[in-house]
Image: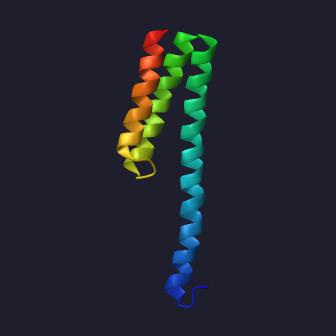
Amino acid sequence: MANSASSRKRARQAVKRNKHNSQIRAKVRTFIKKVTYALEAGNKEQAQNYFTMMQKMIDQATNKGLIHKNQAARKKSRLNSQIKAL
């Protein structure tokens, strides 16, 4: 357990930051699933709409360091190619 006042504060901040980061990661995963489900349903227009929202979420998470930039690019590229294939 943290002993000094600064380490106790850091522990509190870490818990708060972890909760915030988890929410952002969950939101990104949700949008990826929405795009995937729209693709499976064969709904190109809906998939395209969700894809634009998903792109924004992924880029924000990447800028904050929650997702590696190569992973973000890979996910966007693969989903975009699936949308174009419809």
Specify how the rendered protein is coloured: rainbow
Task: Quadrant for the N terminus, please.
Answer: bottom right
Residue 4 drawn at (x, y percent): 53, 90
In the figure, 73 relative to 13: above or below? Answer: above
Q: Residue at x 57, y 90 (%)?
A: 3
Q: Is residue 83 left or right of residue 15?
A: left
Residue 34 drawn at (x, y percent): 60, 26
Q: Is residue 50 left or right of residue 74?
A: right
Front residue (pair 33, 17): 33
**Toward which corner of the image does residue 43 lie, by quadrant?**
top right
Front residue (pair 75, 34): 75
In the figure, 41 relative to 34: above or below? Answer: above
Residue 33 drawn at (x, y percent): 60, 30
Counting every numbered tag in the picture gives 0
In the figure, 79 relative to 85: above or below? Answer: below
**Toward which corner of the image does residue 8 lie, by quadrant?**
bottom right
Q: Residue at x 57, y 17 (%)?
A: 39
Q: Is residue 73 left or right of residue 27?
A: left
In the picture as drawn, the residue positioned furthest to the bottom comes out as 3
Residue 61 drawn at (x, y percent): 45, 45
Q: Residue at x 63, y 13 (%)?
A: 41
